[in-house]
Structures are given as C-alpha cells and as structure tokens.
Amino acid sequence: MTLVPIAGRTEQLDSGSPSLDDLRKWDREIVWHAFSQMAEYDGLIIESAKGCWLTTIDGQKILDGASSLWCNVHGHTHPKIDAAIVRQLSQVAHVTSLGMSHPATIQLAKRLVDLSPVGLNHVFFSSDGASAVEVAMKMAFQFWRQCPEPQPNRNTFLAVGNSYHGDTLGACSVSDVTRFKSVFDPLLFSVLRGPCPDSYRFPVSLDIRVAQSNERRDANHASVPFNPLTQYYLDQYEAILKQHAANVAAVIVEPLVQGAAGMVVHPPGFLSGLRELTHKYDTLLIADEIAVGIGRTGKMFACEHENVSPDLLCIGKGLTGGYLPMSATLASSQIWNAFLGNYSANIAFQHGHTYGGNPLAAAAAQATLDVFEEEQTLDRLVMKSQRLSELLKKISDHPDVGDVRQVGFIAAVELVADKVTKRPLPTLERRGATVCREALKHGVWLRPLGNVIPIVPPFSIEEHELELLVNALCAGIENTIS
Ligand SMILES: *Cc1c(COP(=O)(O)O)cnc(C)c1O
C-alpha cells in the first residue's frame, strides 16, 4: 500500500497558518517529545482522525494500531463521545474539586463504584496515570498511620520486577524498567522487589513441569488448578512478606499483564495468589489497572478475571475513551474510614490536582461507559480477540519470533535472537523500531517496546482492519532482518 496525499492539499493548512515545513521544524526543535531522543526525532504530525484511522498533515492515512498509546477505546471522533463533550462545554468546562463539584463528576464516580470490583466505594480523581499511582501510594502510607490500630513502621512497598507505574518520582520508585529510571536512582526511594511473574521467560529448571501442566491444560481446555510457575513466583513473594510484612504499606501490581515491561503476561492465578498473600500478611493491595482496565483484557477490570478486589485500584488511559486526561484511584471503605475525623485530628488526605474531576473529562468518561453498553463493546470484543489470535498464529512460526502472547485485546509479538533459547536481540540493534517503521510503510502505526511489538488497537476496529494490521506487522518482520 502506498500513501497518497489527499488531492488538492497545498503546503498551507489554512491561509494564515504556518507551512507544513514550519510545523515539522518546530515539532523537532521546540516541542520536547516524551521518551524521545530529540536529536534524532522524526515523528508524524496528525491533523485529524476518524475511527481507527489517523490522518497526517500531509494527508497520509494510518491505522492506529496502538490506540494512541493504549488509551483510545471506541475509535477517534466517536459521535457519542464528541457530542457529550460539546454538551458539557456548553454548561461549564471546569469546576475545581476543592470544595466544589459537578453532576458529571459525581455521576461518573458513582458509576465507577458500581462497575468496579466489590468493596471499592470511593473515587479520587487526578489527571494522569502516574498521579493516580502516587495517590494510591500516599493513601496506603497514610492509612497505616491513622487506621484503628496504627502501624507507622509500614513505610515501604513491595513491587513487581519489571513493573511500570508512571514517571513521577514516587511512581518511578515502585517501577522497575531500568531504561526509564536508572538515571534518577539517587532521587528515588527504595522498595522491596519481587520477581517478574513472566510466563514466557522463567528458570530452565521449571521447563519440564510447566510444559506438562500446559499439556494438561490443553487437554482440559481449562487452566489446571496447580500451576507450577504461579507457585514458583508466589513462593518468592511469600518469602519477602514473611520477612518484611511489618514494614510493607502495600503490594503494588499491574494485574495480568505488565504493559511497559513488554506486555509480559502473568501465569494464571498469580493475581489471586498475591491477593491471598496480602490478606495472610495483613497488608494492602494496589492494583494498577491504568493499562489493563476499562475493558482491555475483555472484562471491564482485569481483577475480575481472578475475582480479586484490591484495596486500591488505579485507572487512567482508557477512562475517557482516550479523549481527555483523567485518572482515578478507587479506594475501599476501610481506607476511606481511616481518613475520617474532625478538622483538628489532621487526618484528611492532603493531596490534590488542579484539574482532578474535570467535568469535560468526566463527560467523556461517562459517554465512553455509555458506548460500552449501547454497542455491547465487550461482547463483541470476544470475537475480535479470537480473530486476532487466529491472525497472529501465522506470525508465531516465524524464526525471529520468540513469543506471541495475548490477553483479551492486548497482544504482543516478541522478536528474539534465538527461538529455542529465547535469547533476546541486542537492544541497540532496535529491531522492534525497524519493524514498526516498515509496518508504517504498509499504513499501520505500531509503537515498539524494545524488541516487543504491542498490538493494542481500539476496540472498534473492524475485522478487515485487524487483518491489515497483522499483515503490516508480518511484512515488517519479513522485510527486515536482524
Ligand atoms: C501508562 C501507565 C501508567 C502511567 O500513566 P500516565 O498517564 O502516562 O502517567 C501507569 N501505570 C501503568 C500500568 C501504565 O501503563
């Protein structure tokens, strides 16, 4: 597929606006892009979008295979969500959450409580995912200082290997993606760290037992009650908690799939096992569902897959359908109650963000939830997820592909140097980026995580678009060699 500029498009967007070359130059020289080496920066500039398609300023149409970084849900310029925002705009764009509120924000909070796992009865709004994580951590920390039987020694967190929880300093401290955080190490606080419960890469000594249990699982078409890999990881978490629980304010985990780690999929039962451990050792569980929440795994919340109700749950990304910045930290009544008292007790949660609970974002979020109901998005996603896994089968045979993994509508293809030993490709080779550049030539935008290519399209993607996406990725892998 070649990309044809829209007929009649001139170099000028509108009379009086800058030339496209000016825009490209300013974008490289003035705008400081996230996670980008600006000395080499050469990104797309998107003028508009419709459904799953992005249109660049020079008229190229590109399939959004990354849901604009995992946050678009029902497609771009969805008429229902657009209309909800316009309606809200005619009332009021912003109302502070310090001593005031707005019906859109209040109703959204109520809906989130009704939708989320039982016990999460309170909602604190922020503007981005990292802040929702900061809020959860600060709530957990403060909780232990003022709960009925205070335990002020609980001042650290137990976090998961290779986890990612955002880029502010607190979220960065519990995160573990070395490339993102090593330079900031002197600023970060230390935490306890368990292993990454990876179901692709695990100790060779477990190989045979895992293979046997997979065989049993295939035969039964159901997960086996005893998964040696799950047990292997949980044992290590238990060992840490046994020794340090008295100091652990909370365990923080990305349920089921660790996004930025490379869409690492946990073995079944890990989340529920971890939840049992937090009960056994009397500590809190923070579920960071910023990437996996709002339907991405096939259920509204990933925790539902294993019947887990965490004490604190963070959502962001898809909350507004990928329209406006909004995140939320949901808390149990146990947490909330520990913050209640009279003014002089000074136990209120002293934290806030100027735009927390913004009514425009709340209207977009409510419309996003409406569309889930009206379009039966999650029911229709079942077929689409099956179709995606069928399409990905042809990729898994490729000699450079070590693993193809998928949970609901998150999938990823991991490129390796050696399929048998799972030896990773050298990072500096940047094969993942090369593959995505090649896929772009075929009209599909994918954003690599090292040598892992995530496939995270909007839920509204049609079957033929899904085929185009996978074909472009195939071509990307075949036309580039390591
Ligand atoms: C994206 C992400 C965050 C951070 O969200 P921002 O809105 O980028 O701050 C936190 N946790 C997880 C699991 C994420 O995927």
Image: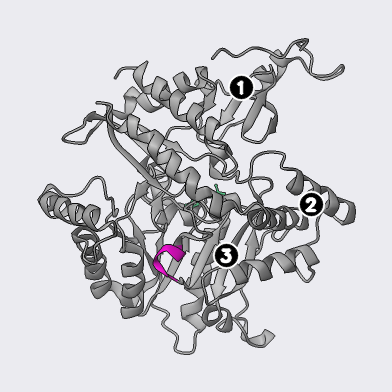
Compared across the picture, whether 297 is left or right of 103 comes to left
Q: Secondary structure at mark 3?
A: strand
Disc 3 marks a residue whose amino acid type is Thr
- Residue 227 against residue 265 in the figure, above or below: below
Question: Which mark's residue is nearer the viewer, 3 or 2?
Answer: 2
> Residue 201 appears in which quarter of the rendering?
top left
Disc 2 marks a residue whose amino acid type is Ala
Q: Position of residue 7 (x, y in %)?
A: 74, 11
Residue at 46%, 72% (x, y): give it.
309
Q: Secondary structure at mark 1?
A: helix
- The residue carrying mark 3 is 329
Question: Which mark's residue is nearer the viewer, 1 or 2?
Answer: 2
Magenta stretch in the rendered image: 303-308
Q: Secondary structure at mark 2?
A: helix
- The residue carrying mark 1 is 28
Name which of mark 3 and mark 2 comes first in the sequence: 2
Sort mark 3 into few (<14), some (14-19) or many (20+) by Cα contacts within 10 Å: many
Is disc 3 in contact with disc 2, using a CB cutoff of under 8 Å?
A: no
Answer whether residue 187 is visible to the viewer in this image.
Answer: yes
> Residue 21 appears in which quarter of the rendering?
top right
The disc at residue 84 is 2
Distance, label 1 to label 2, CA atoms, is 34 Å
Residue at 49%, 89% (x, y): give it.
148
Q: Is residue 304 magenta?
A: yes
- Dot 1 beta carbon under 8 Å from ligand 1: no
Q: Nearer the viewer, residue 374 or 327?
A: 374
Residue at 80%, 67% (x, y): give it.
103
